[in-house]
Image (cartoon, helix red, strand yellow):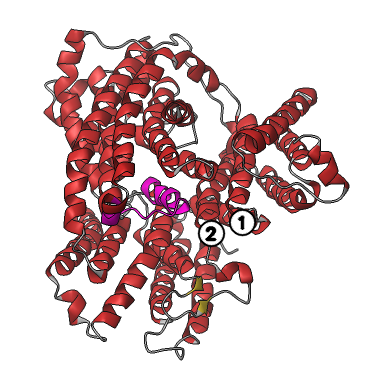
Amino acid sequence: MVLFIGSIAGVILGALPGIGSTLAVSLLIPFTFNLTSAQSLLLLTSIYSATVYGGSISAILLRIPGSYESVATTFDGYPLARQGKAAKALGVALISSFIGGTFSVIVMVIMAPQLAKVALVFGPSEYFALGVLGLSVITSFQTKSVPKSLACAFLGMFLGTVGIDSITGVSRFDFGSLFLKNGISFVPAIIGLFAVGEVLVRVQISRKTELLIHNQSIKSELPSRSELKGLFRVIFQSSVIGTIIGILPGVGGTVASLLGYSAAVRTSKHPEKFGTGILEGVAAPEAANNAACGGAMIPLLSLGIPGSAVTAVLIGAFMIHGLRPGPLLFLNNLDLIYVIFIGMFLTNFLILGFGHFGIKPIVRMLDVPYAFMAPIILVLCVVGSYAINNNIADIFTMLVFGVLGYGLSKHDYPLAPLILGLVLGPIIEISFRRSIIMSQGDLSYIFCRPITSILLIISLISLTYPIIKKIIKQKERM
Amino acid sequence: MISSELLIASGGFFVAIFMYIIADSYSNFSNYNPSFWPKLILIGMIFCFFLIAKKEIKQRTNPEANPEPISEKESGNSWKAFIVTIGILLAYISSINFLGFFFPTTIFTWLILRILGEKKGFRAAVFSIVFSFTCTIFFTKILLVPLPGGIGIFERLNFLFL
């Protein structure tokens, strides 16, 4: 039942422009309080998977990607819709999403337990290095300015230091406030940043935005056997690319779909047809972005390290239920892990069914004006923030972060590094200081351990590579 | 005139310096002092905001790299709607502790609908009442999520809906 609700809600929320997977998951976290941990994680992971597919509906019919991951689907999806083949495009997107999603879940089931076994021998210094690795990807985010990405990550890490220091008991940056002594509430912060901030941005431009629904065909037409045979190579190739990209921290579904699309162009016999409206152009990004979902869950579940904004938000869901993703979860809550595996597997089948038979009402919902959407989202944000501790102060935290999210978004400061900094900052700090305590102040203890040093070298490469690449490009232009 | 971009960067720069001074006061607490990590982060923040501000100043002094500002009308931006929304949201959040969930939510929803261009006042009113009522029932009865009940007479009035 939970999976069914999650899949339907995910497809609808994903299809609505302006509600991406991060917003959808962060908005619904507080409503999982009274569910069991298994139910709430099933609900949120199914919403995560389903929103990625849902984004393709508005990408094909409106040329507005419902979620960021579907941006590449607009390249061929919308031209197909204009040619009167919207039903076929929706069908190809659906079947590609299903295959990509199922493929990545199978890889997740095989890989995550193996990775968790390795991670069981990790000490504080390895966790410090893993945290640094998770943060090192911030320069890879699609941003116009590396300093802005770094500033946001530092801001997130700084906010993570507010409250009582768990090692010395010193209260930091509380300014005498009892509320700040407990630290910044994570869930109201993410709701504010992603949901309220997004609404405020759209409120400012909403009257100029009109949805242009292409009403010629409100149904999904699955590809025939021969069409599927022709698309199989592209779908399989994109599923592999998407899963690998999903595993890599910080890259995410958007890059996966773009890479899947570009790989399909490069390996195609007729690359000139891409962009004019061909089925391969829809199949490639859709298989890749759905495959990235399962891939992104691998480091989250096995190492406890989020690689993207959505998985960082999902950590909040684990925390609400007193769970910490990572290798110990495999030891202490193996049943929960298998529930997530089975749930994500079944979600793909539910998306397939709902995407095929329930497309009509979804498309009708795309016609709902934003004037009606905005108060619904804002009220849900208020209730969600209040429900955590029954505390009005949490709603004010949400509002402050909403205005912050609005200000940052308006000036091209990416929000994902801020959330990653907020989640990973405390992990890095505590692990680093524990390592220092264990080694009695000897820094070589941290940097000479093999796994730690390898992870730190990878982090350094990951952090500096995009910057070096940018500098080389600038020099080439000169 | 200072651009908003420069305002954010310089604001971030000075706030980071102020926080650094505060963090410095934690140094005396213990050997594994709690100031090390925040100070390290704040140095990074100061450096980044300095770079952003420097780039912005450079762009403003170079007329070729400084495009003409787009007017509010051209960009489709509505600052009025934004500021009013923030004000209403603030009033809504401040009032729900005293007035409870149902009444402020109804008024808030109606106001936001009108601000965002819903011309039919009656349709907005019906939607606001139905939405607030559905939310109240859904959260309190189905999801068992507690909502602010209000105080005094409002608590009794809200009780009628719960």
- Residue B24: percent from left, percent from top: 47, 85
- Residue A437: percent from left, percent from top: 30, 82
Label 2 secondary element: loop
Label 1 secondary element: helix
Left/right of residue A68 with respect to residue A461 in the rendered view:
right
Query: What residue is shown with label 1?
Result: A394
Q: Nearer the viewer, residue A257 or B59?
A: A257
Query: Which quadrant of the structure image shows residue A319?
Result: bottom left
The three-letter code of the residue at mark 2 reads Ser
Vertical comparison of A51 with A229: above or below: below
Q: Main secondary structure of the magenta part?
A: helix
* Residues beneath discs 2 and 1 located on the same chain: yes
**Distance of label 2 from label 1 (alpha carbons):** 7 Å
- Residue A330: percent from left, percent from top: 26, 50
Give the tally of numbered discs. 2
Vertical comparison of A228 with A43: above or below: above
Q: Residues within 10 Å of mark 1 (few under 14, many from 20)?
A: many
Numbered tag placed on residue A185 in the rendering = 2
Q: Earlier in the sequence, mark 2 or mark 1?
A: 2
Query: Which quadrant of the structure image shows residue A297?
Result: top left
Vertical comparison of A377 with A159: above or below: above
The three-letter code of the residue at mark 1 reads Asp
Q: Quadrant of the N terminus of chain B?
A: bottom right
**Residue lying farthest to the bottom in this orientation:** B28
Question: In the image, what residue occupies the spot 35% across and 65% down?
Answer: A427
Q: Which chain hosts label 1?
A: A
Vertical comparison of B69 with A175: above or below: above
Question: In the image, what residue occupies the spot 43% across and 20% down?
Answer: A61
Q: Bounds of the magenta span?
A: A310-329
Left/right of residue A279 with respect to residue A336 in the rendered view:
left
- Residue A269: percent from left, percent from top: 11, 21
